[in-house]
Image (cartoon, rainbow, N blue to C red):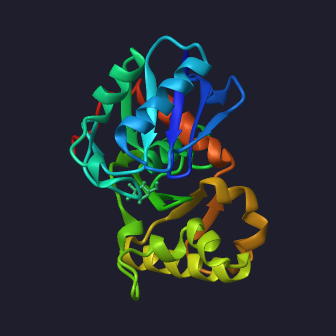
Amino acid sequence: MELLGIDIGGSGIKGALVNSDTGELLTERHRIPTPESRKPKAMAEVVAQLVEHFDYKGPVGCGFPTIVKNGVCISKGNLHKSWVGVNVDELFSQATGQPFTVVNDADAAGYASMNYGVGRGKDGFVIMITVGTGLGSGAFYNGKLIPNFELGQIPYKKYRKIEDWAASSAMEREGLSYERWGKRFNKFLTFVELLVSPDLIIIGGGISKKWNQYSHLIDVETHVVKAELMNHAGIIGAAVSCLREHHHQEV
Ligand code: BGC
């Protein structure tokens, strides 16, 4: 089946058509910058532009960079506070005329890696970390998603949340080298290891393309691999999320 997947991030809103049987992208990825206000109306307009770009009619799966429960945004993440309480499924369905299923972006990326990528067939406790504007995390136990894990929210030093110190946005903001940023990221991974003892950690998001620049700095005990689907995992996982049981709040 051909489905549109959209991955919403703090800096870009990206989409592509995906083959939901194989998890392959069927088109080039199309990216539109996230509006600076990061507010619902402006972002819904960009989502509508993406749907129009692909001239797409049908169910759309969408990864969203906040806690999402039953299609409703629960936290502001790195977006505007007016998102909290918004039914994102409804907002985007209205803006585009197509039915939307909206899930957390890192949960979506993890879902793709567990089904089509390096996580395939991996039992035990697997954590997907997406590195971008924020630090997203998706948790899987024996292949089953535990939704809305938020490991990037751990407070650290003077930072309200460790993602403000160790996401790739911190590298840009503070002009850090890969060497310096990689040490921060490794510190974050040591916390993840200490807190939840995963069996495997998968690293995704835009930064997975630069893996060779920092992977030598990762020295946790847990096996750490890059998502070979790279930053396409978010789009692929989002697309197929509309095929899953509509929402997965059984935990
Ligand atoms: C949000 C997460 C999200 C992550 C990556 C964080 O700020 O709290 O829900 O997955 O950013 O976008």
Q: Is residue 75 visible?
A: yes
Residue 168 locus on image (x, y percent): 60, 66
Residue 103 locus on image (x, y percent): 37, 39
Residue furthest to the bottom in view is: 157
Vertical arrangement, residue 86 with respect to residue 5, above or below: below
Vertical arrangement, residue 152 with respect to residue 93, above or below: below
Residue 52 locus on image (x, y percent): 55, 18
In this orientation, which residue lies closer to the viewer: 249 or 122?
249
Vertical arrangement, residue 227 with respect to residue 58, above or below: below
In this orientation, which residue lies closer to the viewer: 147 or 68?
68
Residue furthest to the right in view is: 212
> Would residue 115 appear left or right of 100 to someone viewing this image?
right
Q: Name the quadrant of the N terminus.
A: top right
Q: Quadrant of residue 98?
A: top left
- The number of callouts visible is 0
Q: Residue at x 57, y 75 (%)?
A: 185
Q: Quadrant of residue 4?
A: top right
> Would residue 193 appear left or right of 213 to someone viewing this image?
left
Vertical arrangement, residue 25 with respect to residue 135, above or below: above
Q: Quadrant of ligand 1?
A: bottom left
Q: Residue at x 57, y 66 (%)?
A: 169
Q: Residue at x 36, y 62 (%)?
A: 150
Residue 85 locus on image (x, y percent): 21, 44
Q: Is residue 218 visible?
A: no
In this orientation, which residue lies closer to the viewer: 69 or 226?
69
